Image (spheres, rainbow, N blue to C red):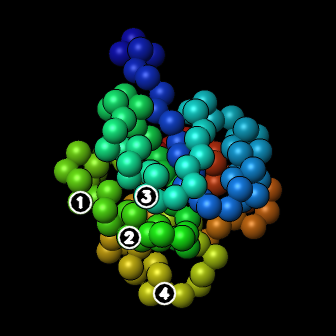
Amino acid sequence: MEDMQREVRPIFMVDDNLNEFYIAERCYKMSGLHHPFRHITSGVDLIQFLQDADPSHLPHVVLMDINMPGINGIEATRKIRSIAEFEKSIYIIILTNSDNPRDYFDAKEAGANEVMTKPDSIEEYRDFFTRLKTIN
């Protein structure tokens, strides 16, 4: 009964590329997830939202693009993890098109739970979102 009353926390996609978000949103809808899916265009905006938000509106998962203007996804992750209440409460996945091992190392060191190459097909994106159902 308690699980039924617990609010479903949203999934945030932080990416400055609107086309990437629209593709991800379509695939998200195909996955059957029931979390609200929100878009934020920068790491700075995400950090501001987290600091101002009511705890019940905090994201369950953040999909963070690695390359964004202002502060990149690695630095945004580092800043989020430096705030005590967000140290463990938000699952962060850094998404990249890079195959540079340094990016993967830096993202994990900054506090990302996962680092992965952005899906490059509708099927991969849909499967990616379906897998998010297992994140608690």
Calculate the distance from the C-alpha at mark 4 to the C-alpha at mark 1: 24 Å
Q: State how far apart marks 2 and 1 are (Cα).
A: 11 Å
State yes or no: discs 4 and 1 in contact (Cβ < 8 Å).
no
Q: Which residue is mark 4?
A: 101
Mark 2 or mark 3: which comes first in sequence?
Answer: 3
Which mark sits nearer the N-terminus, 4 or 2? 2
Give the secondary structure at mark 2. helix
- Residue at point 54%, 70% (across, down): 69
Sooner in the amino-acid sequence: mark 4 or mark 3? 3
Task: Tell which residue pokes out farthest to the top in this image.
Answer: 1
Q: Earlier in the sequence, mark 4 or mark 1?
A: 1
Callout 4 touching callout 3 (CB < 8 Å): no
| Element marked by disc 4 | helix
The residue that disc 3 covers is 44
Nearest to viewer (mark 4 / mark 1): 1
- Work out whether 42 lies above or below 100: above
**Tag 3, which secondary structure?**
helix
Pair 2/3: label in front: 3
Occupied quadrant, residue 56: top left
In the rendered structure, the answer to whether residue 108 lies left or right of residue 70 reads left
Under mark 4, the amino acid is Pro
Q: Amino acid at mark 3?
A: Val
Viewed as shown, does residue 100 lie left or right of 46? right
Q: Callout 3 environment at 10 Å: few (<14), some (14 to 19), or many (20+)?
A: some
Vertical order, 73 against 62 (above or below):
below
- CB within 8 Å, label 2 to label 3: no
The residue depicted at 64 percent of the width and 45 percent of the height is 130
Q: What residue would you read off at disc 1?
A: 82
